[in-house]
Every structure is written in C-alpha cells, then in structure tokens.
Amino acid sequence: MNINPTVIAIPIYFLLIGFEFIVLRLKKHKSYRLKDAMTNINCGVVSQITGAFLLVTLFSAYTLIEEKFGFFNIPIVWWAFPLAFVFFDFMYYWAHRLSHEINLFWGGHSVHHQSEEYNLSVALRQSSTQILWTFLFYLPLALAGIDPIVFITSQGLNLVYQFWIHTESIKKMPRWFEFIFNTPSHHRVHHARNPKYIDKNHAGTLIIWDRLFKTFEKEDEPPHYGITKPLKSWNPVWANFAHYSAILSDLKRVPSVKDKVRLLFKKPGWKPEYMGGFEKAPDIHPAYEKFENRTSVRLNFYVSFQFLVLMTSTMFFLYYVNELEISKKIISALFIIFSVASFGFLFENRKWSRLIEFIRLIAVPIAFISLFYSKWLTVASLIAIAYLIISLIWFIQIKGRLALLAQK
C-alpha cells in the first residue's frame, strides 16, 4: 500500500471539500463552480498518476545520492523528522520562488494558479511536470544524509499542511500564527493576479522565509485569482502544456540563440526589446468576467457521475499502485488520463467530444475486466457490463437531446 501522506489523506481532502462547499452554499458564497472544481481535481489526478511513475525514478535517485554521497548518516529517530521538515520547507521556498521567477519552471507551476476561484479544490490542482524542475532543489537533503523515508514523510506533510490554506472561509488567524506560519490570508495573496501581489508569499509552511527574503506581502486589497493570461479551458491535460506551448511559440519567433536561452530562464513575461520588452502584469479590469461556458444540466449530471466513478477507481489505483504489474499500471494510468481529458472535452462542447466519450465507455469494461482477469472475473464482468449499459443509455439520451436543441 502507498504510504505517501498526500495519498493517504485523499479521503479527508474530499470530505473537507464537500464540507466547505456545503457551508459556502448555505452562506450563498459562490466560490465553487462545477467545471472549475472538477478541473482542479482532475489536474490533481493527472499529477498523481504521472507521479506514480516519476517518483519511483526520482526517489531512487535521491536514495542513491543519500547512500553514496551523504556527508552525514542521520538515522530514523524522532528529531530527524522536525529537522528534515524545516530543511525541506526552506528548500521548498526556493523551489517555489524560482518556479515563479524562471519562465521554464513556471511552465510546470502555472497549472496550480490557473483556477479563477479560491477554495479547497484548488489545493489539489497540481502540475505533472513541476517535479522535474523542483526535485533538484531537494537534493541537498540527500547530501545532508536525510533518510529517504524521512524525506518523503517531510514532503508529504508539507503538502498536507498546504491543503487547508486554500480557502476564503478563514479570514485571519491569531497574530503570532500569522507571523510564523503560512495561512489562508497569506496564500490568497500568493494566488492573486493583482499587480502588487504577483510573486509574493512563496512559503510552504513557514512564512518566515518570505519575511526574511523580502517577498512577503500582506492581504490588504481584495484578491483576484488566476493567471495574467487566463487558460480558458476545462481540459486538465492541456492545462499542463499550455504555458510550454506559449514558450515554444515565442522561441520560434526569437532569432538569437542567446535570447532563446534568456526567454527560457528569465522571468515569465520577458521578451527581447525588439519584441516589445518585458510584459508587466496588467491591472485588473473592472469589467473582467471569469471564464465560463454553458452546458446542459443533464450533461453536468452525467459527467459528475462518471467523475465520481473515476475518482473511486483512481483512489484504489493510487493506494495499490506498488502492487500492480507494470502492464496493468500503464493501462490504468492511460485510461484515467484519457478519461479526465474526455470530461474536459465534454465540458468545452468540442465537436468530437461525443465520439471520444463513446470510445471511453467501450474501453471501460475492457480495461476493468483485464485488470481483474485472474480474480473475480465473473463479478468484474457483471459490474463492467452493468456500468456500460447504464452509461451508454444515459449518454445516448443526452446526445440526442443536445442534437434536438441544436436543430431548434
């Protein structure tokens, strides 16, 4: 079973998201939108699925460096955990800060900032590629002799802590707490695209790093969330590549090799003078409206049902991923990523989204039966067939109704 604290806490995350949603609805606070929240969670799903493969390699690299090149040999004792936690948090600050200040790194981290809402579901909106850049910042822990188990625990607890600060439900914590720790107020600033808030409050757990290195900004004006160039998409796969695509487009237009390198490693928004120079964050336009598109209530219910089924399957995959054969692991991962992409296409009303969803529905029983072929084959077959029949009838009704509406 997967012992990563982030994975173990998944049911608690969903319970808290549900609780916050109910509380905010009772207060008539509209900080949750179905498509936005679902896309946030689906980005987290893609991140966890790809991480199930990437983390094996990176964890092995960390272990090798700690064993071969560690200056010290810190055993797994009680004091190793707080030591590693603070050390990790310090390196997280720099990894996070440079993910905002280096264009290439921002390609990964920008995913986390794309939502134009601010609620607990945003905490789950994570990148699938950011770890490729940020992992390098944590190698000093390996060189210091921090045991891999202690490292992965510190990393997991750091991320678990950051979950609760993604909320507007908590305004301020006690003054002493606000001075030392990262809080919802501090992190709202970090997620805002107000010009004065850009690139502020990079802390993971301890806000003292921002105070020490002059990147702290207090919340004193209403934050407007999202990135300066809105994503305008519900596709979690595209969300992971959107900024890289923009970088590639800019690189094609830059003739100088030197400027190509600068474009990659300067701040986001940097361009050579002959291309207009640095593009500052724009002011918040009073008439700006968040990205939204209309979809039928029936389609929303259908996607929500499929989403819940997929989330249940994904949780089992993440818990038992280490026990699966590599072929089953790959099949499961590809199917889950394909599914969340299909949900995004449906929400965006793409012309070919219906065809993709039909393909996905047909693939579900095939994938399900293949995974359980050696165990409970009869039960697995019955479940898969029942799911397919119900889903196809439901989806065909929706498809037919949408076609009639289009004719009118």
Image (tube, rainbow, N blue to C red):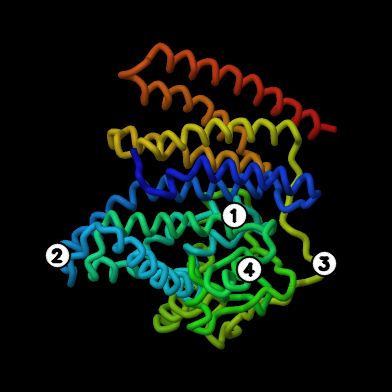
Mark 1: few, some, or many residues within 10 Å (few <14, many ≥20)? many
Q: What is the distance, in whole Å, between disc 4 and disc 3 at their CAs?
A: 35 Å
Mark 3 — residue? Answer: 287
Q: Amino acid at mark 3?
A: Ala
Q: For this view, does 277 lie left or right of residue 321?
A: right
Who comes first in sequence, dot 2 or dot 1? 2
Q: Of helix, strand and loop, which one carries label 3?
A: loop
Q: Amino acid at mark 2?
A: Lys
User: Does 24 sit above or below residue 183?
Assistant: above
Q: Nearer the viewer, mark 4 or mark 1?
A: 4
Residue plotted at (39% across, 69% down): 86
Mark 4: few, some, or many residues within 10 Å (few <14, many ≥20)? few
Who comes first in sequence, dot 4 or dot 1? 1
Residue plotted at (43% across, 14% down): 379
Mark 2: few, some, or many residues within 10 Å (few <14, many ≥20)? few
Point out which mark residue 68 bears.
Answer: 2
Residue plotted at (48% across, 74% down): 97
Mark 1 — residue? Answer: 122
Point out which mark residue 174 bears.
Answer: 4
Q: Of helix, strand and loop, which one carries label 4?
A: loop
User: Does 239 sit above or below residue 205?
Assistant: above
Q: Of helix, strand and loop, which one carries label 1?
A: helix
Q: What is the distance, in whole Å, between disc 1 and disc 3 at their CAs?
A: 24 Å
Q: Amino acid at mark 1?
A: Val
Q: Amino acid at mark 4?
A: Pro
Whole-percent x and y of residue 157? 43, 56
Q: Of helix, strand and loop, which one carries label 2?
A: helix
* Residue 228 visible in this rendered orientation of the protein: no
Who comes first in sequence, dot 3 or dot 2? 2
Q: For this view, does 153 lie left or right of residue 23?
A: left
Point out which mark residue 256 bears.
Answer: none
Mark 3: few, some, or many residues within 10 Å (few <14, many ≥20)? few
